[in-house]
Image: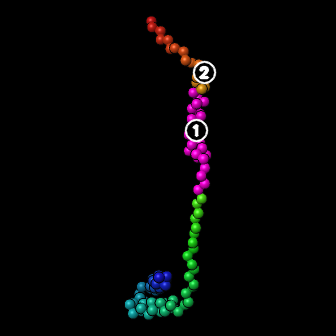
Amino acid sequence: MKTVLLIVALATTCLAVQPAAAASSWDTAPRLVMAAASLQAQPSAPSQPDASIDIKVEKDSHAWYTNPVWLAIGGLGLLLLIVLIVLAARGGGGATVVSSK
């Protein structure tokens, strides 16, 4: 398959390089045959084996409290508890008096 693609690429290059005035159907056929013959005459490079990639994922079982999501939920809960304690300690639980005239 690589040889066929290389032949097509070489043939396209040969057609593109020659001037349009000199191009004729009987002139291009021998060039294509010579290009194909020269490619077949050259020894092909040995194909390299496919690279194998092994991905190994080892999942360690961690405790639920080391999960970042649970740490964030716990942090927000602790922050809310602190805010509630501070608001309760400030007092401010007095009654609102609306005076009428």
The image quadrant that residue 43 belongs to is: bottom right
Residue ID for mark 2: 90
**Secondary element at image label 1:** helix
In the image, residue 22 above or below residue 93: below
Taking the spot 52% from the left edge, 14% from the top edge, the residue there is 95
Q: Is residue 68 magenta?
A: yes
Residue 72 or residue 92, whichever sits in front = 72
Residue 42 or residue 68, whichever sits in front = 68
Residue ID for mark 1: 74
Residue 52 is tagged as none
Residue 100 or residue 30, whichever sits in front = 100
The secondary structure making up most of the magenta span is: helix
Q: Residues within 10 Å of mark 2 (few under 14, many from 20)?
A: few
Q: Which residues are magenta?
A: 59-84
**Secondary element at image label 2:** loop
Q: Is residue 10 magenta?
A: no
Q: What's the residue type where badge 1 is placed?
A: Gly
Most distant residue in the left direction: 25
Q: What's the residue type where badge 2 is placed?
A: Arg
